[in-house]
Image (cartoon, rainbow, N blue to C red):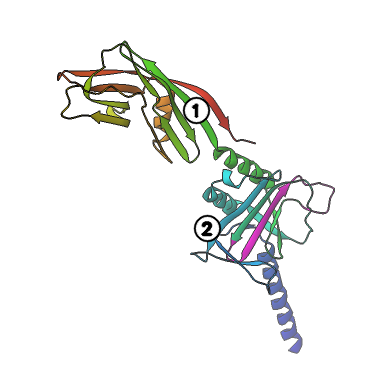
Amino acid sequence: MKNRYLIIAVIVVVVAITICLFLLYSPRPVIKSPYSMAYDIERTYSAESSGASYKTVDDNYFFVDRILYYREDVTDRFDPEALACLLSKSMSRRTSRKHGSADILWEISIIRRNGPIHICLGQADSNSEKILNYWYQSGPCFQILDPIALMNSLEQLMKNNAKSTKVYLLSGENDFIKIDNGAIILSSGLEKFIGGELSIKGDLLSSVKNYTTEYFFYKDGEKTTFNKNTMLIDGSANGIRIGSDLGSTSSEKMFSADVWDMITNAEALYFSLNGTFVNGENFDYSFIVNVKNIFQDTAEK
């Protein structure tokens, strides 16, 4: 009877160890769901601890600390949410093999509630007993199961979110007015429209009571006006001369990408000068603006 119980106990222990080993070494994503994005984090250092403690508004946070590509910091060229989604789908397995440090292409540092996570991807030597495609967190080391796919996806994410700058020159004229030195500057985080300089041909518009300058375009039959300037006077018989400076407008996001594509790639941008002479007569002059791309720089590796 005792032998029977002993055999059962051994079987239970073996099964328990097998299940533990299976769970311990079964594939798991680099980042487990659920998680919430954090864009700012508080670090606290103490003399008693060799590392830092971290705090943010949500205990289940995901924070991108730093991304190095060929030892160059490319953190600002990544969308943190897209990176989190990618890592939540990238599988790994715990390994007892030692990891190497040479020929590392990618080094990614992430902070979660359990502390820092470090991901290293590189060119592994098939003859080496060490691995180069791994991640670790305060002890355990996990081997990335499909490092080539992960590295290709990282390069695509970086390319999709690469910061770029485009500059377009604006000009145009008709029989009465002319504009020069206008510009559109499109860069990551800033869109700027510079109206340029307005010139009047002859003395036709030498004395006006009020006037308005504006740029505009049509989309789906609707007119959208921007960079609009209005000047008027009251109680004067002499009137005013039309100024040359057309001003500028800038913001983080003025228009959607499809509107900018329409304005910069087709004859879709218009300029108008309209108003009233001192004698009460109205005037209205407009033309299609010439838009020419003069500079383009995309920060791609």
Quarter of the figure with residue 235: top left
Please tell me whether residue 292 is drawn above or below residue 78 in the rendered image: above
Where's residue 208, x and y in %?
Answer: 22, 21
Between 131 and 268, the one nearer to me in the picture: 268
Residue furthest out toward the right: 127
Asked if residue 120 lies in the magenta stretch, the reply is yes
Q: Where does label 2 land, which residue?
A: 40
Residue at 47% in and 33% down: 186
Mark number displayed over residue 167: 1
Residue at 71% in and 77% down: 13
The span from disc 1 to disc 2 (Cα, nearest Å) is: 32 Å
User: Pointer 2: residues within 10 angstroms few (<14), some, or many (20+)?
Assistant: few
Along the horizontal axis of the image, is 82 left or right of 127?
A: left
Range of residues picked out in magenta: 112-131
Between 129 and 159, the one nearer to me in the picture: 159
Residue at 44% in and 36% down: 191
Where's residue 183, x and y in %?
Answer: 44, 26
